[in-house]
């Protein structure tokens, strides 16, 4: 069996107390100090991470605002471009319409001039034909009016053919 002597128990207890006292003076304080430092370091790291997260959130928010502003600017530019396109098309249509009206008016004026010239020419030809017929009628002496009427009819038919 195993027996424990009183002397061994006392000396073991004394050795334990000396080791415990030495550990308390020499080891526990530095161990607790390094644990405290590590705890502080972890706390500071967590605070830094929280600040970084807040800054990232702020940057994300700022980026979203910038994107929204860029989209608004893009929409504004596109709207102005559409308005400018519509204005250019409207101006071109207006100018084309005015030019068309001017060309039509010019053509009508030219047609009217040509018509007047043709009418004047036609009047001159009718007058000339009338003079020729009258001259032929006067040169020829007829015995009766029927012959005179037949000649006038014949001359009118030949004048219409020309």
Image: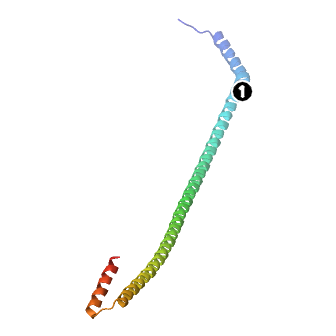
The answer to whether 102 is drawn above or below residue 72 in the figure is: below
Where is residue 80? Give x, y as percent.
56, 60
Q: Residues within 10 Å of mark 1 (few under 14, many from 20)?
A: few
Query: Which of 24/156 is in front?
Result: 156
Identify the image quadrant of residue 115.
bottom left
Q: SS at mark 1? A: helix
Furthest residue in direction bottom, as rendered:
144
Identify the image quadrant of residue 18.
top right
- Image-based side of 108 in relation to 18, left or right: left
Residue beneath label 1, please?
29
Furthest residue in direction top, as rendered:
1
Where is residue 144? Give x, y as percent.
27, 94
Coloured how? rainbow
The answer to whether 49 is drawn above or below residue 130 in the figure is: above
Identify the image quadrant of residue 31.
top right
The answer to whether 107 is drawn above or below residue 42 in the figure is: below
Furthest residue in direction right, as rendered:
25
- Image-based side of 4 in relation to 113, left or right: right
Query: Which of 61/134 is in front?
Result: 134
Identified at 55% across, 58% down, the residue is: 81
**For the C terminus, which image quadrant?**
bottom left
Query: Which of 29/137 is in front?
Result: 137
Identified at 44% across, 78% down, the residue is: 118
Identified at 37% across, 90% down, the residue is: 138
Where is residue 56? Give x, y as percent.
61, 44
Query: Which of 145/26 is in front?
Result: 145
Total numbered badges shown on the rendered structure: 1
Where is residue 51? Give x, y as percent.
65, 43
The answer to whether 151 is drawn above or below residue 106 in the figure is: below
């Amino acid at each position: 069996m195993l027996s424990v002597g009183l002397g061994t128990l006392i000396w073991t207890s004394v050795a334990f107390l000396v080791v415990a006292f030495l550990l308390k003076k020499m080891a526990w304080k530095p161990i607790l100090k390094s644990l405290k430092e590590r705890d502080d370091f972890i706390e500071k790291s967590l605070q830094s991470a929280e600040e970084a997260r807040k800054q990232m959130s702020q940057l994300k928010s700022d980026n979203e605002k910038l994107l929204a502003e860029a989209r608004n600017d893009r929409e504004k530019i596109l709207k102005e471009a559409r308005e400018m396109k519509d204005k250019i098309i409207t101006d071109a249509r207006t100018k084309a319409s005015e030019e068309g009206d001017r060309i039509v008016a010019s053509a009508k004026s030219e047609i009217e001039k040509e018509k007047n010239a043709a009418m004047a020419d036609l009047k001159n030809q009718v007058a000339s034909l009338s003079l020729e017929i009258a001259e032929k009628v006067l040169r020829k002496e007829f015995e009766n009016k029927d012959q005179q009427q037949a000649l006038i009819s014949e001359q009118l038919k030949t004048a219409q053919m020309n």
